Image (tube, rainbow, N blue to C red):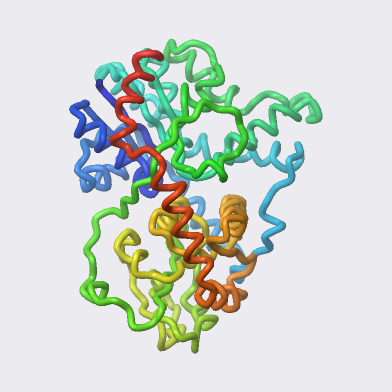
Amino acid sequence: MRVLFATHSERTHFYSLIPLAWALRVAGHEVYVASQPALTDDITQAGLTAVPVGEDHTFHEQVRRMQESADSDGAAQADGVEPPPTWEGQGLLYRAFVDHYMKGVNNDAFVHGLVEFARGFRPDLVVWEPYTFAGPVAARAVGAAHARLVFSPDLLQQMRATFLRLRAQAPESERVDPLESWLGPLLARYGAGEFTQDVAVGQWTIDTVPEEVRLPLGLRTVPMRYVPYNGPAVVPEWLHVPPARPRVCLTGGLTQRDQAGQDAFPVAGLDVFDGLDIELVATLKQAPGEAAAVPGNTRLVDFVPLLALLPSCSAVVHYGGGGTWNTSLGAGVPQLLIANSWYGLLKGRHLERAGAGLYVADRRALREPLVRLLEDPSFGRAARRLRDERILAQPTPGELVPVLEKLTAEHR
């Protein structure tokens, strides 16, 4: 088969595609990865063939401007980050998400460039990152089968389902699905037919999310094990030696750093861990002008590959980002989430139900639950059980290749 992976230039989202891209390539299929020019080096560093198309989006610059103008101390209220399942809650949020984020990262030049490449390449299958709607447009334009690959709870489609169910309550001028009103004309422009449900959700969804965390959307789902990729990385020498005290990883993730230009967790906030009998490995960078003291139990590092670090850890503290969360599940490490986002709250609740972790609303309240995670061995047992019975039970990317070959033949 000829397989085209499509992603806008968000490297952490691209990282979730790499293991399947390599599995298809190793199986003998022809694989290309198309994105905006900014992602080219990340694609080639992963050993894959890059196809830069269109123009770079400017979403990161917009986020940084918002970050600079925001006045926040990093606190959050968990009950305030989950929008209610109402028109005023999820319906309006869905409209804003499509209008500002989806259209922004799928600019017209990117969509056009992807379609033009697909017309020459003639892929049998297009696999698209779940926010890269240029992918299904290009697939439709050339008659290819197409699938989404999701790595976190499917919140966009949850919001869309709420919107469609409740739009009769909205003012008449706001009842049209913004995804349809945006993508419908694009499909027509490229002779790709009318907007239908598959343009929104794929002909099927490749889902790395554990079944217990998947939202009940009634989609055709093909499960796949999440295999971590942390980008070009070197295992530091200090990681060769087992820790003398319980090792705890604290990370803000790469997405916040990429988008806002700084880490989600400030170095000044590390004082909440001061005095604990742990080795804290904090993957943070001090912001320009920041001169906060680093506690004596803390190793401050710019970056370390989580797939190498987490197996030596007794706990991991993070914000619930897809890569960190999935890598932690696969490592069988208890997790403590700072739930300042809807997706973080969903994951935190799941961890608590499974007995494999805890979550807090405010990063300043981390100390007590972290001590609880470290002192109660039931959390470690539950995290390892979740890994063994749920994560490792999922088909690997290599095992999924025959399934994709069959589905592609059915949907082309």
Q: Quadrant of the C terminus?
A: top left
Instruction: Give 336 or 363, whichever is nearer the viewer.
Output: 336
Could you tell whether 198 is left or right of 39 in the image?
Answer: right
Residue placed at 60% from the left, 78% from the top?
368
10, above or below 240, in the image: above
281, above or below 38, in the image: below
Instruction: Give 64 or 298, whichever is nearer the viewer.
Output: 298
Q: Position of residue 191 (x, y in %)?
A: 43, 10
> Can residue 280 be seen from the camera position used here?
yes
> Can residue 107 be seen from the camera position used here?
no
Q: Position of residue 198 (x, y in %)?
A: 51, 21
Residue placed at 55% from the left, 17% from the top?
196
Q: Quadrant of the N terminus?
A: top left
Q: Quadrant of residue 51?
A: top left
Q: Quadrant of residue 47?
A: top left
138, above or below 294, in the image: above
Q: Quadrant of residue 156?
A: top right
Could you tell whether 85 is left or right of 296 in the image?
Answer: right
Could you tell whether 70 is left or right of 32 in the image?
Answer: right
Q: Position of residue 292 (x, y in %)?
A: 46, 83
Residue placed at 74% from the left, 45% from the top?
84
Q: Position of residue 171 (x, y in %)?
A: 79, 29
